[in-house]
Image (tube, rainbow, N blue to C red):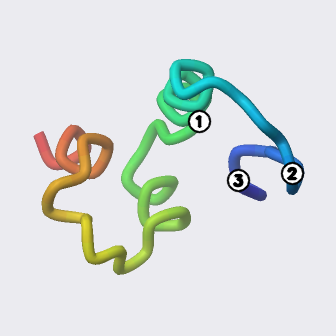
Amino acid sequence: MEKLKIKEGTVMEADEAFSLVNSQLVNPSDINDVCGTCKWRQKCLWYMQDEE
């Protein structure tokens, strides 16, 4: 939330959230900062794009 500059309690449509994530997670360190060791890492669209 902090990296994406989203305030607690913010409500947004899914497409707006995806757009925000796509614009803010632009390199491997961004993804690692936000996702860390998330158990969904191997199935994550953002993480997988980074490995290509």
Location of residue 50 in the rendering, given as x and y in whole percent from the top left corner: 25, 44
Which residue is disc 3 drawn over? 3
Q: Do the residues bearing badges 3 and 2 touch, measured as CB atoms within 8 Å?
A: no
Mark 3 crowdedness (10 Å alpha carbons): few <14, some 14-19, many ≥20? few
Which one is nearer the viewer's eye here, 31 or 6? 6
Depth check, front residue: 2 or 13: 13
> In the image, what residue type sits under mark 1?
Gln
Residue that label 1 marks = 24
Would you place residue 12 above or below residue 4 in this image? above
Amino acid type assigned to the residue bearing label 3 in the image: Lys
- SS state under label 1: helix
Question: What's the CA distance linking mark 2 and mark 1?
Answer: 19 Å
The residue that label 2 is drawn on is 9
Q: Quadrant of residue 19?
A: top right
| Percent x, y of residue 40 | 25, 66
Q: Amino acid at mark 2?
A: Gly
CA–CA distance in space, label 3 to label 2: 15 Å
Quarter of the N terminus within the rendering: bottom right
Q: Secondary structure at mark 3?
A: loop
Return the x and y of residue 37 as percentages of the image width and height.
Answer: 35, 80
Residue 11 falls left or right of residue 51: right
